[in-house]
Amino acid sequence: MQIIDTNVSLSRWPLRRLPLDETPELVARLRRYGVVQAWAGSFDGLLHKDIAGVNLRLAADCRKHGNGLLVPFGSVNPTLPDWEDDVRRCHEEYQMPGIRLHPSYHGYQLDDARFAHLLELAAERKLVVQITLTMEDERMQHPLLRVPHVDTKPLLEMAGTRPDVPIVLLNAFRSVRAEQAAALASAGNIYFEIAMLEGVGGVGKLLQKVPIDRLLFGSHAPLFIFESALEKLRESALHGRILKGLCTDNARRLHP
Amino acid sequence: MTDIKHMEARTAEHRPTGQGVTRRESLRIGAVGALSASLQLTRRSWAEAGSGNREADATEPVRTTTGETRIWDGHTHLASIRGEKPADRMAQLIEYADRMRIERLVVFMGWPFAYDPSPDQFRRQNDQVLAAIHDWPDRVLGYAYVNPNHIDHSLEEMQRCIVRGPMVGIKLWVAKRCNDSALDPIVQRATELQIPIYQHTWLKITGNLPGESTPSDLAELASRHPRATLLCGHAGGDWELGIRTVRPFKNILLEVAGGDPTAGFVEMAVRELGAERVIYGSDAGGRSFASQLAKVEAAGITDREKKLILGVNLRRLLSPIFKTKGLKS
Ligand SMILES: [Zn+2]
Protein backbone atom coordinates (compact mmCIF):
# COMPACT_ATOMS: atom_id res chain seq x y z
CA MET A 1 0.00 0.00 0.00
CA GLN A 2 1.50 3.30 -1.08
CA ILE A 3 0.62 6.49 0.75
CA ILE A 4 0.77 10.12 -0.21
CA ASP A 5 0.80 12.19 2.96
CA THR A 6 -0.52 15.62 2.04
CA ASN A 7 0.17 17.25 5.40
CA VAL A 8 3.66 17.25 6.85
CA SER A 9 5.86 20.14 7.99
CA LEU A 10 9.62 20.56 8.22
CA SER A 11 11.83 22.62 10.52
CA ARG A 12 10.81 23.49 14.08
CA TRP A 13 7.41 23.81 15.71
CA PRO A 14 7.86 27.12 17.55
CA LEU A 15 6.64 25.89 20.94
CA ARG A 16 8.16 22.47 21.51
CA ARG A 17 10.79 20.10 20.18
CA LEU A 18 9.18 17.11 18.49
CA PRO A 19 10.46 13.54 18.30
CA LEU A 20 10.66 13.70 14.48
CA ASP A 21 11.55 17.31 13.81
CA GLU A 22 14.88 16.37 12.23
CA THR A 23 14.04 15.86 8.59
CA PRO A 24 16.00 12.62 8.06
CA GLU A 25 14.18 11.02 10.99
CA LEU A 26 10.81 12.14 9.71
CA VAL A 27 11.61 10.78 6.26
CA ALA A 28 12.71 7.45 7.72
CA ARG A 29 9.46 7.12 9.66
CA LEU A 30 7.34 7.97 6.64
CA ARG A 31 9.19 5.47 4.48
CA ARG A 32 8.75 2.77 7.08
CA TYR A 33 5.00 2.94 6.57
CA GLY A 34 5.02 3.04 2.80
CA VAL A 35 4.74 6.78 2.28
CA VAL A 36 5.97 7.45 -1.25
CA GLN A 37 5.29 11.16 -1.29
CA ALA A 38 4.86 13.74 1.46
CA TRP A 39 3.66 17.25 0.74
CA ALA A 40 5.82 19.32 3.02
CA GLY A 41 5.36 22.85 4.25
CA SER A 42 7.50 24.55 6.86
CA PHE A 43 6.66 25.40 10.45
CA ASP A 44 8.78 28.52 9.81
CA GLY A 45 6.07 29.71 7.44
CA LEU A 46 3.78 30.38 10.40
CA LEU A 47 5.69 33.22 12.03
CA HIS A 48 8.75 34.13 10.00
CA LYS A 49 8.57 37.37 8.02
CA ASP A 50 11.34 36.32 5.64
CA ILE A 51 9.10 33.88 3.80
CA ALA A 52 11.45 33.85 0.81
CA GLY A 53 14.16 32.47 3.10
CA VAL A 54 11.73 29.93 4.55
CA ASN A 55 10.87 28.61 1.09
CA LEU A 56 14.49 28.53 -0.02
CA ARG A 57 15.37 26.33 2.97
CA LEU A 58 12.26 24.20 2.50
CA ALA A 59 13.14 23.47 -1.12
CA ALA A 60 16.75 22.70 -0.17
CA ASP A 61 15.72 20.40 2.72
CA CYS A 62 13.33 18.48 0.50
CA ARG A 63 16.05 18.01 -2.11
CA LYS A 64 18.71 17.10 0.43
CA HIS A 65 16.78 14.66 2.59
CA GLY A 66 13.75 13.62 0.63
CA ASN A 67 15.25 11.55 -2.17
CA GLY A 68 12.04 12.18 -4.10
CA LEU A 69 9.76 11.63 -1.14
CA LEU A 70 9.38 15.20 0.09
CA VAL A 71 7.43 17.55 -2.17
CA PRO A 72 7.80 21.16 -1.05
CA PHE A 73 4.73 23.36 -0.67
CA GLY A 74 6.06 26.86 -0.05
CA SER A 75 4.40 29.28 2.32
CA VAL A 76 2.83 32.42 0.94
CA ASN A 77 1.74 35.30 3.13
CA PRO A 78 -0.31 37.74 1.03
CA THR A 79 -0.08 40.43 3.69
CA LEU A 80 3.68 40.86 3.06
CA PRO A 81 5.08 43.36 0.57
CA ASP A 82 5.65 41.88 -2.89
CA TRP A 83 4.22 38.50 -1.86
CA GLU A 84 3.40 37.75 -5.49
CA ASP A 85 7.08 37.13 -6.07
CA ASP A 86 7.00 34.35 -3.46
CA VAL A 87 4.35 32.65 -5.57
CA ARG A 88 6.52 33.09 -8.66
CA ARG A 89 9.60 31.69 -6.92
CA CYS A 90 7.72 28.69 -5.54
CA HIS A 91 6.58 27.85 -9.03
CA GLU A 92 9.47 28.90 -11.27
CA GLU A 93 12.55 28.52 -9.11
CA TYR A 94 11.60 25.53 -7.00
CA GLN A 95 9.06 23.84 -9.28
CA MET A 96 6.68 23.37 -6.40
CA PRO A 97 3.31 21.88 -7.36
CA GLY A 98 1.52 23.99 -4.79
CA ILE A 99 1.67 26.49 -1.98
CA ARG A 100 0.52 26.47 1.63
CA LEU A 101 -1.38 29.28 3.33
CA HIS A 102 -1.78 30.04 7.03
CA PRO A 103 -4.43 32.76 7.02
CA SER A 104 -5.01 32.78 10.76
CA TYR A 105 -1.30 33.08 11.55
CA HIS A 106 -0.93 35.80 8.90
CA GLY A 107 -3.97 37.74 9.98
CA TYR A 108 -6.43 37.74 7.10
CA GLN A 109 -9.76 36.14 6.31
CA LEU A 110 -10.73 34.22 3.21
CA ASP A 111 -12.98 37.03 2.02
CA ASP A 112 -9.87 39.23 1.69
CA ALA A 113 -9.28 40.58 -1.83
CA ARG A 114 -5.64 39.50 -1.62
CA PHE A 115 -6.73 35.90 -1.17
CA ALA A 116 -8.89 36.13 -4.29
CA HIS A 117 -5.93 37.54 -6.19
CA LEU A 118 -3.73 34.76 -4.86
CA LEU A 119 -6.15 32.18 -6.21
CA GLU A 120 -5.97 33.92 -9.59
CA LEU A 121 -2.19 33.62 -9.62
CA ALA A 122 -2.42 30.01 -8.52
CA ALA A 123 -4.83 29.30 -11.37
CA GLU A 124 -2.48 30.85 -13.91
CA ARG A 125 0.37 28.70 -12.65
CA LYS A 126 -1.77 25.61 -12.08
CA LEU A 127 -0.78 25.38 -8.42
CA VAL A 128 -2.55 23.42 -5.72
CA VAL A 129 -3.47 25.71 -2.82
CA GLN A 130 -3.33 24.23 0.67
CA ILE A 131 -4.97 26.19 3.46
CA THR A 132 -4.12 25.20 7.01
CA LEU A 133 -7.24 25.85 9.06
CA THR A 134 -5.54 25.35 12.38
CA MET A 135 -2.36 23.87 13.83
CA GLU A 136 -3.51 22.72 17.25
CA ASP A 137 -6.39 22.44 19.71
CA GLU A 138 -7.46 26.01 20.49
CA ARG A 139 -7.93 25.06 24.15
CA MET A 140 -4.25 24.46 24.77
CA GLN A 141 -2.58 27.18 22.76
CA HIS A 142 0.19 29.25 24.27
CA PRO A 143 -1.39 32.24 26.04
CA LEU A 144 0.58 34.64 23.86
CA LEU A 145 -0.12 32.75 20.66
CA ARG A 146 -3.84 32.27 20.54
CA VAL A 147 -4.59 31.82 16.87
CA PRO A 148 -8.20 31.32 15.76
CA HIS A 149 -9.37 28.67 13.30
CA VAL A 150 -9.75 29.87 9.72
CA ASP A 151 -13.39 30.55 8.90
CA THR A 152 -14.27 28.64 5.74
CA LYS A 153 -17.61 30.35 5.07
CA PRO A 154 -16.24 32.69 2.37
CA LEU A 155 -15.02 29.62 0.49
CA LEU A 156 -18.58 28.43 0.01
CA GLU A 157 -19.18 31.32 -2.37
CA MET A 158 -15.71 31.77 -3.84
CA ALA A 159 -14.82 28.21 -4.60
CA GLY A 160 -17.50 27.86 -7.24
CA THR A 161 -15.93 30.69 -9.20
CA ARG A 162 -12.52 29.01 -9.18
CA PRO A 163 -12.98 25.44 -10.35
CA ASP A 164 -9.49 25.76 -11.85
CA VAL A 165 -7.74 25.82 -8.44
CA PRO A 166 -7.75 22.72 -6.26
CA ILE A 167 -7.97 23.85 -2.66
CA VAL A 168 -6.85 21.40 0.01
CA LEU A 169 -7.97 22.20 3.54
CA LEU A 170 -5.45 20.96 6.09
CA ASN A 171 -6.41 20.15 9.68
CA ALA A 172 -9.98 20.94 8.79
CA PHE A 173 -11.85 18.65 11.14
CA ARG A 174 -11.07 20.42 14.38
CA SER A 175 -13.44 23.19 13.25
CA VAL A 176 -15.32 21.91 10.19
CA ARG A 177 -18.15 19.43 10.73
CA ALA A 178 -18.89 16.68 8.24
CA GLU A 179 -22.00 18.51 7.00
CA GLN A 180 -20.00 21.67 6.37
CA ALA A 181 -17.32 19.66 4.60
CA ALA A 182 -20.00 18.16 2.37
CA ALA A 183 -21.28 21.65 1.54
CA LEU A 184 -17.76 22.86 0.74
CA ALA A 185 -17.09 19.80 -1.41
CA SER A 186 -20.20 20.42 -3.46
CA ALA A 187 -19.50 24.17 -3.70
CA GLY A 188 -16.16 23.81 -5.39
CA ASN A 189 -12.87 22.06 -6.06
CA ILE A 190 -12.17 21.50 -2.36
CA TYR A 191 -10.39 18.59 -0.67
CA PHE A 192 -9.83 17.50 2.91
CA GLU A 193 -7.29 15.37 4.73
CA ILE A 194 -7.87 13.29 7.84
CA ALA A 195 -5.20 14.36 10.37
CA MET A 196 -7.63 16.07 12.75
CA LEU A 197 -10.60 13.83 12.07
CA GLU A 198 -11.79 12.29 15.32
CA GLY A 199 -14.55 10.00 16.54
CA VAL A 200 -14.56 6.24 16.55
CA GLY A 201 -14.63 4.95 12.96
CA GLY A 202 -14.36 8.59 11.90
CA VAL A 203 -13.24 8.08 8.30
CA GLY A 204 -16.02 5.61 7.59
CA LYS A 205 -18.58 7.97 9.06
CA LEU A 206 -17.21 10.93 7.12
CA LEU A 207 -17.49 8.94 3.90
CA GLN A 208 -21.24 8.78 4.41
CA LYS A 209 -21.31 12.55 3.93
CA VAL A 210 -18.30 13.59 1.85
CA PRO A 211 -17.48 11.95 -1.51
CA ILE A 212 -14.39 9.75 -1.40
CA ASP A 213 -12.69 11.61 -4.26
CA ARG A 214 -12.40 14.68 -2.02
CA LEU A 215 -10.59 12.95 0.81
CA LEU A 216 -6.82 12.69 1.11
CA PHE A 217 -4.45 11.07 3.55
CA GLY A 218 -2.77 13.56 5.87
CA SER A 219 -0.94 13.08 9.14
CA HIS A 220 0.11 16.56 10.36
CA ALA A 221 3.43 14.95 11.27
CA PRO A 222 5.68 15.62 13.00
CA LEU A 223 3.48 17.76 15.26
CA PHE A 224 0.95 14.94 15.30
CA ILE A 225 1.89 11.29 15.51
CA PHE A 226 1.97 9.85 11.99
CA GLU A 227 0.56 6.51 13.12
CA SER A 228 -2.64 8.20 14.30
CA ALA A 229 -3.74 8.84 10.72
CA LEU A 230 -2.56 5.42 9.65
CA GLU A 231 -4.47 3.55 12.34
CA LYS A 232 -7.67 5.37 11.33
CA LEU A 233 -7.69 3.43 8.07
CA ARG A 234 -7.82 0.21 10.00
CA GLU A 235 -10.34 1.47 12.52
CA SER A 236 -12.72 2.20 9.65
CA ALA A 237 -11.77 -1.08 7.90
CA LEU A 238 -11.15 0.71 4.61
CA HIS A 239 -10.20 -1.39 1.66
CA GLY A 240 -10.10 -1.58 -2.11
CA ARG A 241 -10.93 1.46 -4.21
CA ILE A 242 -11.82 3.60 -1.19
CA LEU A 243 -8.53 2.92 0.55
CA LYS A 244 -6.48 3.46 -2.58
CA GLY A 245 -8.37 6.64 -3.40
CA LEU A 246 -7.78 8.08 0.04
CA CYS A 247 -4.16 7.03 0.32
CA THR A 248 -2.87 7.70 -3.19
CA ASP A 249 -5.16 8.12 -6.19
CA ASN A 250 -6.93 11.30 -5.11
CA ALA A 251 -3.68 13.07 -4.31
CA ARG A 252 -2.12 11.86 -7.56
CA ARG A 253 -4.91 13.47 -9.51
CA LEU A 254 -3.90 16.80 -7.96
CA HIS A 255 -0.16 16.27 -8.45
CA PRO A 256 0.45 13.51 -11.00
CA MET B 1 -18.99 -12.75 36.51
CA THR B 2 -17.21 -14.82 33.91
CA ASP B 3 -19.74 -16.12 31.46
CA ILE B 4 -17.84 -17.88 28.75
CA LYS B 5 -20.80 -19.31 26.90
CA HIS B 6 -22.46 -15.97 26.72
CA MET B 7 -19.29 -14.42 25.48
CA GLU B 8 -18.64 -16.98 22.81
CA ALA B 9 -22.12 -16.43 21.45
CA ARG B 10 -21.31 -12.77 21.25
CA THR B 11 -17.97 -13.39 19.71
CA ALA B 12 -19.45 -15.36 16.88
CA GLU B 13 -21.88 -12.56 16.13
CA HIS B 14 -19.21 -9.95 16.24
CA ARG B 15 -16.36 -11.63 14.51
CA PRO B 16 -14.29 -8.89 12.94
CA THR B 17 -14.73 -8.91 9.19
CA GLY B 18 -12.09 -10.72 7.25
CA GLN B 19 -10.44 -12.30 10.23
CA GLY B 20 -10.34 -16.01 10.56
CA VAL B 21 -9.98 -16.19 14.31
CA THR B 22 -12.60 -15.60 16.94
CA ARG B 23 -11.99 -12.96 19.51
CA ARG B 24 -11.64 -15.59 22.21
CA GLU B 25 -8.92 -17.29 20.20
CA SER B 26 -7.37 -13.94 19.64
CA LEU B 27 -7.24 -13.23 23.36
CA ARG B 28 -5.77 -16.65 24.04
CA ILE B 29 -2.96 -16.48 21.51
CA GLY B 30 -2.36 -12.78 21.97
CA ALA B 31 -3.20 -9.87 19.78
CA VAL B 32 -0.28 -9.95 17.41
CA GLY B 33 -0.39 -13.70 17.14
CA ALA B 34 -4.08 -13.58 16.33
CA LEU B 35 -3.59 -11.06 13.61
CA SER B 36 -0.86 -13.14 12.05
CA ALA B 37 -3.02 -16.21 12.28
CA SER B 38 -5.95 -14.39 10.79
CA LEU B 39 -3.83 -13.26 7.89
CA GLN B 40 -2.53 -16.83 7.57
CA LEU B 41 0.97 -15.50 7.89
CA THR B 42 0.99 -14.72 4.21
CA ARG B 43 1.20 -10.98 4.37
CA ARG B 44 3.88 -8.82 5.75
CA SER B 45 3.55 -5.74 7.89
CA TRP B 46 3.07 -2.34 6.34
CA ALA B 47 6.54 -1.38 7.24
CA GLU B 48 7.99 -4.28 5.31
CA ALA B 49 5.56 -3.79 2.48
CA GLY B 50 6.57 -0.15 2.27
CA SER B 51 10.26 -0.88 1.96
CA GLY B 52 9.80 -3.91 -0.23
CA ASN B 53 7.29 -2.40 -2.65
CA ARG B 54 4.85 -5.24 -2.16
CA GLU B 55 1.17 -4.54 -1.97
CA ALA B 56 -0.25 -5.06 1.46
CA ASP B 57 -3.71 -4.57 2.84
CA ALA B 58 -4.41 -1.45 4.87
CA THR B 59 -6.11 -3.40 7.58
CA GLU B 60 -2.87 -5.07 8.50
CA PRO B 61 -1.22 -4.25 11.78
CA VAL B 62 0.92 -1.20 12.06
CA ARG B 63 1.60 -1.97 15.67
CA THR B 64 4.93 -0.93 17.05
CA THR B 65 4.40 -2.92 20.21
CA THR B 66 5.57 -6.49 20.14
CA GLY B 67 4.49 -9.67 21.84
CA GLU B 68 1.17 -10.21 23.51
CA THR B 69 0.17 -6.73 24.50
CA ARG B 70 -3.16 -6.92 26.29
CA ILE B 71 -4.80 -3.58 25.71
CA TRP B 72 -7.35 -2.33 28.21
CA ASP B 73 -8.93 0.99 27.35
CA GLY B 74 -9.61 2.92 30.54
CA HIS B 75 -12.02 5.49 29.10
CA THR B 76 -14.92 5.00 26.69
CA HIS B 77 -18.49 6.23 26.45
CA LEU B 78 -21.81 5.16 25.05
CA ALA B 79 -22.39 8.69 23.79
CA SER B 80 -21.24 9.82 20.32
CA ILE B 81 -22.39 6.50 18.88
CA ARG B 82 -25.76 5.96 17.29
CA GLY B 83 -28.17 3.39 18.66
CA GLU B 84 -31.45 3.13 20.52
CA LYS B 85 -30.26 0.88 23.30
CA PRO B 86 -27.02 0.49 25.26
CA ALA B 87 -26.58 -2.92 23.63
CA ASP B 88 -26.69 -1.42 20.12
CA ARG B 89 -24.11 1.17 20.98
CA MET B 90 -21.91 -1.24 22.88
CA ALA B 91 -21.93 -3.70 19.99
CA GLN B 92 -20.56 -1.01 17.70
CA LEU B 93 -17.90 0.03 20.16
CA ILE B 94 -16.86 -3.61 20.60
CA GLU B 95 -16.60 -4.06 16.85
CA TYR B 96 -14.21 -1.11 16.57
CA ALA B 97 -12.32 -2.35 19.64
CA ASP B 98 -11.93 -5.75 17.95
CA ARG B 99 -10.42 -4.10 14.89
CA MET B 100 -7.93 -2.33 17.12
CA ARG B 101 -7.35 -5.47 19.23
CA ILE B 102 -8.48 -3.90 22.47
CA GLU B 103 -9.37 -6.56 24.98
CA ARG B 104 -11.47 -4.63 27.48
CA LEU B 105 -13.21 -1.29 27.66
CA VAL B 106 -13.98 0.74 30.73
CA VAL B 107 -17.26 2.55 30.08
CA PHE B 108 -18.66 5.39 32.09
CA MET B 109 -21.59 7.78 31.72
CA GLY B 110 -24.53 7.09 29.45
CA TRP B 111 -26.34 9.60 27.32
CA PRO B 112 -27.26 12.36 26.92
CA PHE B 113 -24.29 13.97 28.69
CA ALA B 114 -25.29 16.26 31.56
CA TYR B 115 -22.81 18.63 33.23
CA ASP B 116 -24.59 18.63 36.58
CA PRO B 117 -26.78 15.53 36.56
CA SER B 118 -29.62 15.11 39.02
CA PRO B 119 -29.66 11.83 40.99
CA ASP B 120 -32.27 10.52 38.54
CA GLN B 121 -30.08 11.46 35.61
CA PHE B 122 -26.92 9.82 36.89
CA ARG B 123 -28.84 6.72 37.95
CA ARG B 124 -30.31 6.46 34.46
CA GLN B 125 -26.88 6.87 32.89
CA ASN B 126 -25.42 4.23 35.20
CA ASP B 127 -28.29 1.93 34.24
CA GLN B 128 -27.24 2.28 30.61
CA VAL B 129 -23.69 1.30 31.52
CA LEU B 130 -24.95 -1.60 33.66
CA ALA B 131 -26.88 -2.86 30.64
CA ALA B 132 -23.71 -2.73 28.53
CA ILE B 133 -21.77 -4.65 31.18
CA HIS B 134 -24.55 -7.20 31.44
CA ASP B 135 -24.32 -7.93 27.72
CA TRP B 136 -20.52 -8.03 27.58
CA PRO B 137 -19.33 -9.21 31.00
CA ASP B 138 -15.90 -10.23 29.77
CA ARG B 139 -15.27 -7.19 27.64
CA VAL B 140 -16.78 -4.25 29.46
CA LEU B 141 -16.02 -2.71 32.85
CA GLY B 142 -17.86 0.24 34.30
CA TYR B 143 -17.18 3.17 36.58
CA ALA B 144 -20.15 4.67 38.42
CA TYR B 145 -20.92 8.25 37.43
CA VAL B 146 -21.74 10.31 40.52
CA ASN B 147 -22.16 13.98 41.36
CA PRO B 148 -20.67 15.67 44.45
CA ASN B 149 -23.57 18.13 44.42
CA HIS B 150 -25.70 15.17 45.59
CA ILE B 151 -23.54 13.42 48.14
CA ASP B 152 -26.07 11.08 49.75
CA HIS B 153 -27.41 9.94 46.42
CA SER B 154 -23.89 9.50 45.14
CA LEU B 155 -22.94 7.29 48.08
CA GLU B 156 -26.10 5.26 47.54
CA GLU B 157 -25.26 4.95 43.88
CA MET B 158 -21.78 3.67 44.73
CA GLN B 159 -23.42 1.09 46.94
CA ARG B 160 -25.83 0.05 44.16
CA CYS B 161 -23.39 0.03 41.24
CA ILE B 162 -20.15 -1.06 42.90
CA VAL B 163 -20.86 -2.89 46.16
CA ARG B 164 -24.00 -4.67 44.98
CA GLY B 165 -23.36 -4.21 41.25
CA PRO B 166 -20.48 -5.01 38.89
CA MET B 167 -18.82 -1.60 38.60
CA VAL B 168 -15.21 -1.12 39.60
CA GLY B 169 -14.52 2.60 39.86
CA ILE B 170 -15.89 6.14 40.09
CA LYS B 171 -16.24 8.78 37.42
CA LEU B 172 -16.41 12.45 38.33
CA TRP B 173 -16.93 14.92 35.54
CA VAL B 174 -17.64 18.65 35.60
CA ALA B 175 -20.39 19.15 38.19
CA LYS B 176 -18.04 20.49 40.87
CA ARG B 177 -14.37 21.33 41.04
CA CYS B 178 -12.63 18.49 42.76
CA ASN B 179 -10.70 20.54 45.31
CA ASP B 180 -14.04 21.12 47.07
CA SER B 181 -14.37 19.37 50.42
CA ALA B 182 -17.84 18.22 49.33
CA LEU B 183 -16.04 15.41 47.50
CA ASP B 184 -14.47 14.01 50.65
CA PRO B 185 -17.15 11.42 51.53
CA ILE B 186 -17.04 10.03 47.98
CA VAL B 187 -13.26 9.83 48.02
CA GLN B 188 -13.25 8.25 51.48
CA ARG B 189 -15.74 5.61 50.39
CA ALA B 190 -13.79 4.89 47.19
CA THR B 191 -10.63 4.53 49.27
CA GLU B 192 -12.36 2.03 51.55
CA LEU B 193 -13.54 0.09 48.51
CA GLN B 194 -10.03 0.29 47.01
CA ILE B 195 -11.32 1.56 43.69
CA PRO B 196 -9.88 4.24 41.41
CA ILE B 197 -11.50 7.63 41.01
CA TYR B 198 -11.43 9.00 37.51
CA GLN B 199 -11.57 12.79 37.64
CA HIS B 200 -11.96 14.70 34.37
CA THR B 201 -9.47 17.57 34.33
CA TRP B 202 -8.72 20.23 31.79
CA LEU B 203 -6.79 23.45 31.79
CA LYS B 204 -8.28 25.48 28.98
CA ILE B 205 -6.83 28.74 27.82
CA THR B 206 -10.31 29.34 26.40
CA GLY B 207 -11.78 29.02 29.91
CA ASN B 208 -13.02 26.06 31.94
CA LEU B 209 -16.63 25.30 32.70
CA PRO B 210 -17.68 26.54 36.17
CA GLY B 211 -17.41 23.09 37.75
CA GLU B 212 -14.55 21.82 35.60
CA SER B 213 -11.47 20.73 37.55
CA THR B 214 -7.88 21.53 36.72
CA PRO B 215 -4.90 19.30 37.53
CA SER B 216 -4.13 21.68 40.44
CA ASP B 217 -7.58 21.03 41.89
CA LEU B 218 -6.84 17.33 41.71
CA ALA B 219 -3.48 17.86 43.38
CA GLU B 220 -5.29 19.51 46.31
CA LEU B 221 -7.63 16.56 46.56
CA ALA B 222 -4.71 14.14 46.40
CA SER B 223 -2.91 15.83 49.25
CA ARG B 224 -6.05 15.58 51.39
CA HIS B 225 -6.46 11.90 50.48
CA PRO B 226 -3.01 10.36 50.10
CA ARG B 227 -4.45 6.82 50.15
CA ALA B 228 -6.95 7.41 47.36
CA THR B 229 -6.13 6.30 43.82
CA LEU B 230 -6.81 9.25 41.54
CA LEU B 231 -6.73 9.40 37.77
CA CYS B 232 -5.95 12.76 36.22
CA GLY B 233 -8.28 12.60 33.23
CA HIS B 234 -6.97 13.85 29.87
CA ALA B 235 -3.66 14.70 31.58
CA GLY B 236 -5.27 18.06 32.15
CA GLY B 237 -5.60 18.63 28.41
CA ASP B 238 -2.61 20.95 28.41
CA TRP B 239 -0.41 17.99 29.22
CA GLU B 240 2.88 19.84 29.54
CA LEU B 241 1.36 21.64 32.52
CA GLY B 242 -0.74 18.70 33.70
CA ILE B 243 2.26 16.39 33.98
CA ARG B 244 4.24 18.90 36.04
CA THR B 245 1.26 19.63 38.26
CA VAL B 246 0.61 16.04 39.31
CA ARG B 247 4.28 15.02 39.40
CA PRO B 248 4.76 15.40 43.19
CA PHE B 249 1.56 13.51 44.04
CA LYS B 250 2.34 9.84 43.89
CA ASN B 251 -1.28 8.74 44.26
CA ILE B 252 -2.24 10.50 41.03
CA LEU B 253 -1.93 8.59 37.77
CA LEU B 254 -2.00 10.42 34.47
CA GLU B 255 -4.56 9.40 31.88
CA VAL B 256 -3.77 10.25 28.27
CA ALA B 257 -7.22 10.07 26.65
CA GLY B 258 -9.17 12.56 24.73
CA GLY B 259 -6.68 15.10 23.43
CA ASP B 260 -4.97 15.40 20.09
CA PRO B 261 -2.32 12.83 19.17
CA THR B 262 0.47 15.30 19.74
CA ALA B 263 3.94 13.84 19.37
CA GLY B 264 6.06 13.74 22.50
CA PHE B 265 3.19 13.67 25.01
CA VAL B 266 3.62 10.14 26.28
CA GLU B 267 7.40 10.41 26.14
CA MET B 268 7.28 13.39 28.50
CA ALA B 269 4.79 11.66 30.79
CA VAL B 270 7.04 8.60 31.08
CA ARG B 271 10.14 10.73 31.58
CA GLU B 272 8.60 12.80 34.37
CA LEU B 273 6.29 10.33 36.12
CA GLY B 274 7.54 6.88 35.17
CA ALA B 275 5.47 4.55 33.01
CA GLU B 276 3.82 3.03 36.11
CA ARG B 277 1.86 6.27 36.55
CA VAL B 278 0.57 6.59 32.98
CA ILE B 279 -2.70 5.03 31.84
CA TYR B 280 -4.07 4.61 28.33
CA GLY B 281 -7.65 5.52 27.56
CA SER B 282 -9.27 6.75 24.36
CA ASP B 283 -12.46 8.69 25.13
CA ALA B 284 -14.11 6.82 22.24
CA GLY B 285 -16.72 7.28 20.67
CA GLY B 286 -16.00 11.03 20.76
CA ARG B 287 -12.36 10.28 19.97
CA SER B 288 -11.01 7.57 17.76
CA PHE B 289 -9.25 4.52 19.17
CA ALA B 290 -6.70 5.04 16.40
CA SER B 291 -5.50 8.49 17.38
CA GLN B 292 -5.35 7.66 21.05
CA LEU B 293 -3.62 4.28 20.75
CA ALA B 294 -1.04 5.85 18.48
CA LYS B 295 0.02 8.15 21.33
CA VAL B 296 1.30 5.12 23.21
CA GLU B 297 2.15 2.69 20.47
CA ALA B 298 4.25 5.09 18.43
CA ALA B 299 5.91 6.74 21.42
CA GLY B 300 9.66 6.53 21.79
CA ILE B 301 9.50 4.39 24.92
CA THR B 302 10.28 0.76 25.59
CA ASP B 303 7.91 -2.12 24.89
CA ARG B 304 7.75 -2.79 28.61
CA GLU B 305 6.62 0.79 29.21
CA LYS B 306 4.01 0.51 26.47
CA LYS B 307 2.61 -2.64 28.05
CA LEU B 308 2.35 -0.92 31.42
CA ILE B 309 0.47 2.03 29.94
CA LEU B 310 -1.76 -0.03 27.66
CA GLY B 311 -3.05 -2.42 30.31
CA VAL B 312 -0.76 -3.59 33.10
CA ASN B 313 -1.22 -0.42 35.16
CA LEU B 314 -5.00 -0.47 34.91
CA ARG B 315 -5.12 -4.15 35.87
CA ARG B 316 -2.93 -3.33 38.87
CA LEU B 317 -5.26 -0.51 39.97
CA LEU B 318 -8.27 -2.74 39.62
CA SER B 319 -6.78 -5.82 41.24
CA PRO B 320 -8.16 -5.13 44.78
CA ILE B 321 -11.75 -4.70 43.59
CA PHE B 322 -11.36 -7.61 41.16
CA LYS B 323 -10.25 -9.73 44.09
CA THR B 324 -13.20 -8.59 46.20
CA LYS B 325 -15.59 -9.43 43.40
CA GLY B 326 -13.85 -12.64 42.38
CA LEU B 327 -13.23 -11.29 38.89
CA LYS B 328 -10.43 -12.48 36.67
CA SER B 329 -8.25 -10.04 34.83
ZN1 LIG C 1 -14.63 11.13 28.34
Image (spheres, rainbow, N blue to C red):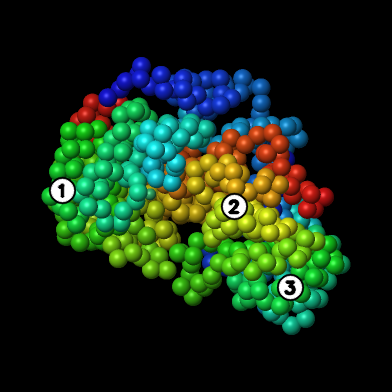
N-terminal of the two: label 2 or label 3? 3
**B243 left or right of A130 in image:** left
Looking at the image, residue B30 lies above or below residue B213? above
**Which residue has dot 3 on it?**
A116
What's the residue at 18%, 43% (across, down)? B157
Three-letter code, disc 3 = Ala
On the image, the x and y values in percent for residue B215 come to 33, 60
Q: Under tag 2, what secondary structure?
A: loop
In the image, B228 versus B115, the foreground residue is: B115
Residue at the disc numbered 2:
A195
Q: Residue at x 81, y 76 (%)?
A: A85
Disc 2 to disc 1, how far (Cα)? 43 Å
| In-front residue for pair B279/B248 | B279
**Do badges 2 and 3 share one subunit?**
yes
Query: Which element is circle 1 on?
Result: helix
Chain to which the residue tagged by mark 2 belongs: A
Q: Position of residue A245 (x, y in %)?
A: 71, 42
Foreground pick, B162 / B242:
B162
Query: In which quadrant will I find the N terminus of chain A?
Result: top right
Alpha carbon distance from label 2 to label 3: 26 Å
